[in-house]
Image (cartoon, rainbow, N blue to C red):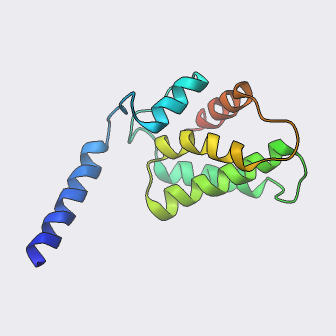
Amino acid sequence: MLFTVFSSNVQAQNDVTSAQNRVLSNKHHASMIANSLGITVSTLGGWDVNKVITTLTDKLHNVNPNSQDPKQLFQYVYYATTLQDIRDYSVAPEISLVQRLIDAKVKVKNGPPLTNAYLTQFYNSLTNNF
């Protein structure tokens, strides 16, 4: 049993290491979202995770969670859930930043729907910081 646990831990570490500096498959969920929005998923491991966390935290603190503006609510949900992915669950920021675009959009139900053009501009503007 101890050998099995040790083997699993070594394999998990190898998986993380092998994921660095890799491009996602076109069949990956984040790639499909990116393709539909006309954005490019960054190479895994290409961003400084601490810089991403700091930037998202700063942006989250500048958003009013009680706002009725759909864009403000989207940003709040997006920053909070992306931070949780990256900080608490070690999801690669290159993946979470793409996948959470659609998740946050779906959660914001009041007001006019957010367009794909807005999501693309939002993502590109944010990721220029990394």
**Looking at the rendering, in which quadrant would you find the N terminus?**
bottom left
Q: Quadrant of residue 83?
A: bottom right
Quarter where residue 53 is shown: bottom right
Q: Residue at x 48, y 41 (%)?
A: 94
In depth, the one of 126 and 75 nearer the eye is 75
Q: Could you say where residue 21 lies in the image, as x and y percent from the top left?
A: 32, 36
- Give the percent coordinates (x, y) of residue 65: 82, 58
Q: Position of residue 101 (x, y in %)?
A: 63, 40
Q: Is residue 39 visible?
A: no
- Tell me if I can see residue 28 in this picture: yes
- Which residue occupies 12% across, 70% down? 4
Residue positioned most to the top: 38
Quarter of the figure with the C terminus: top right
Judged left or right of residue 102, residue 11 is: left
In the picture shown, does residue 45 fall above or below 77?
Answer: above
Q: How many numbered dots are placed on residues in this image?
A: 0
Task: Give the camera-side residue of 25 and 64.
Answer: 25
Residue 3 pos. (x, y %): 8, 73
Classify residue 95 as left or right of residue 67. left
Quadrant for residue 119, please give it.
top right
Residue visible at 58% across and 21% down? 38
69 or 64: nearer the viewer: 69
Name the residue: 35% across, 31% down: 25
**For residue 62, side relative to residue 77 (left or right):** right
Q: Is residue 9 above or below residue 121?
A: below
Residue found farthest to the left = 3
